[in-house]
Amino acid sequence: MAVFQGKHIILGVTGSIAAYKAADLASKLTQQGAQVDVILSAGAEKFITPLTFQSVTGRRAYTDSDLWGGEAHILHVGLGHSTDLLVIAPCTANTLAKLAHGIADNLLTVTALAAGGEKTREIPILVAPAMDAGMYEHPATQANVRTLKERGVLFIGPAEGRMASGLVGLGRMVEPAEILGHIRLALGRHGRLAGKHLVITAGGTQEPIDPVRYITNRSSGKQGYALAQAALDEGAAVTLVTHPTGLTPPVGAQVLEVRTAQEMLEAVLSAIESADGLIMAAAVADFRVKQVATHKLKKNEGIPHLELEAAPDVLGTVANLRHRLKRLKAVIGFAAESHDLLENALAKLSSKKLDLIAANDISAPDAGFSVNTNRITLLYADGRRQSFPLMSKDEVAQIILEQVAALLE
Ligand code: CTP
């Protein structure tokens, strides 16, 4: 992923049973394209070896034995200054206390001081605490947490759950996939869309027939979620308006869950009041049942005759409000078509007063609903057209976000 490419990340690992999960995190970061230097504390070495990290990162892992070697006087400064981000996962109560008080008695804490000490370049420090039940809530730890938060250190968790000790409580390290999301958010914070707010819709809506049945469509939500992630990667604040898809929303997105076209309309209208852009990737229902049954329709009542009526058109409604929404500079729609792709897309571009529409032919088996790939043509309000080959939905999202950034500049 572009947001990780060429980024230098220091992963500090301290003495907790969750240290084994740090190997997964190191592996995930490396796979995303980051250059990962791992520093193990002496406690961490009791749980996991440097070789484990070297094997997944392809780089040497550092330990306290490096603190007293020949290059020691420059190592912590070099590591600390060249890094884009320092993450400590798992971070014990002991290391939290050291960070809060500026104690620098091992390579990791010395590096943390060096990384934070340079005033000219702000380096995000993220910590994922892991400790036994009761230790996180202890007033001493809480005081340290407050000190570090005031200093801008970002906390990921801890989560509630069962500890290795058998106790249940607050203190489990957050799972590596979620930590990765927080790192991604921190790395993207100064992107092209920093300071901008985008509203992105995803998935298909559900129009009820009775309390147990509804009409929906094949939209998986994947394209909308990929757009939300790509927007966060560029530093935007994101409101994701989505029906319950079962997909994990990207870390950092404000999620508004809706079911019907009416609910989506209301959520979008309230969110766009403060938005710079709207991307309607959702497949909103065009029709809904006029009289929704209040009880479950029974077979012995005969075959129901469902009368349909038009569902609200979200983009159509926004089009009529654009003169009032001065901040809303980029409105993007999708045209999912099974025939006359470009003609239909052009008609929607103009009737919905869009700045850009992404047209895709859903009759192709490898594009559109449910699959992981898409093939789009972008049509602009100013008459420009761009066609793209088959791409992943993540790549499509990046291309659309580049256009959004250009529209907002
Ligand atoms: N859309 C919307 N509200 C609706 C239907 C669609 O806001 N009730 C948005 C979609 O999110 C998409 C764009 O309008 O960005 C085009 O959607 P599409 O389903 O292709 O077109 P429709 O306007 O529904 O027209 P038709 O179904 O006749 O093709």
Image (cartoon, grey):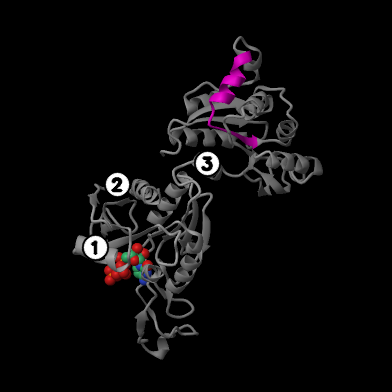
- Numbered disc in front, either 2 or 1: 1
Residue at the disc numbered 2: 391
Q: Residue placed at 50% from the left, 64% from the top?
A: 273
Number of the label disc, if any, that sits on residue 83: none
Give the percent coordinates (x, y) of residue 140. Answer: 80, 40
Disc 1 marks which amino acid?
Answer: Leu
Assess disc 3: are there few (<14), some (14-19) or many (≥20) residues with their C-alpha within 10 Å of its C-alpha: some
The stretch of residues the image draws in magenta is: 73-90
Assess disc 1: are there few (<14), some (14-19) or many (≥20) residues with their C-alpha within 10 Å of its C-alpha: some
Disc 3 marks which amino acid?
Answer: Leu
Residue at the disc numbered 1: 346
Among numbered discs 1 and 3, the one appearing first in the sequence: 3
Q: Quadrant of residue 318?
A: bottom left
- Quote the CA–CA distance across marks 2 and 3: 24 Å
Q: Quadrant of the N terminus?
A: top left
- Residue nearest the observer in this picture, 225 or 52: 225
- Residue nearest the observer in this picture, 226 or 276: 276
Instruction: Tell me the element at label 1.
Output: helix
Disc 2 marks which amino acid?
Answer: Met
Among numbered discs 2 and 3, the one appearing first in the sequence: 3
- Residue 85 counted in the magenta span: yes
Disc 3 CB within 8 Å of nearest ligand 1 atom: no
| Residue 347 visible within the image | yes
- Numbered disc in front, either 1 or 3: 1
